[in-house]
Image (cartoon, rainbow, N blue to C red):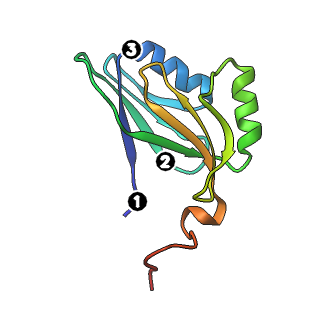
Amino acid sequence: MNMNQVTLPVSDMQAATAFYRRMGFLQIVDTAHYARFECTEGQSTFSLSLETEAFVNGSVIYFEHEALDELVAGLKEKGFAFDQDPTDMSYLWREAILHDPSGNKIKLFWAGNNRLNPPWRVERRD
């Protein structure tokens, strides 16, 4: 199986779509209550769904980019505020953290081979 997309709840569709378009994602669906974006690399997509009720979102969306530090620097030049600058983590990923206008946590990261093959990997496909 291949994951098609993840849908994030948002409280303001206009602010959310503007945020992700400014990050460089290509918007491929645009309605008052739903938007979908194509990632800048590969064939993955993600969606936004307008929530009219208050919500608490504990999920985290991860976007991988090999030139992480340069990506973060470019986004900062566009005015994006980061909660964490690119940092080497104990689990062998380098990641930066920011939030979208609805409070969804976004981790921009680079893990290289460690993303699928960390030293502590449990199972392997034959």
Front disc: 1 or 3: 3
Residue 98, horizontal then vertical, whole percent: 56, 30
Left or right placement of residue 85 versus residue 16 in this view: right
Residue 70 — which label?
Answer: none
Q: Determine which residue is flagged by label 1.
A: 2
- Quadrant in the picture for residue 82: top right
Image quadrant occupied by the N terminus: bottom left
Q: CA distance from mark 3 to mark 2?
A: 23 Å
Residue 12 — which label?
Answer: 3
Q: Residue at x 70, y 43 (%)?
A: 68
Q: Disc 1 residue type? A: Asn
Q: Disc 2 residue type? A: Ser
Q: Secondary structure at mark 3?
A: loop
Q: Looking at the picture, tell me which residue is in the foreground, 32 or 89.
A: 89
Q: Residue at x 58, y 73 (%)?
A: 119
| Among numbered discs 1 and 3, the one appearing first in the sequence | 1
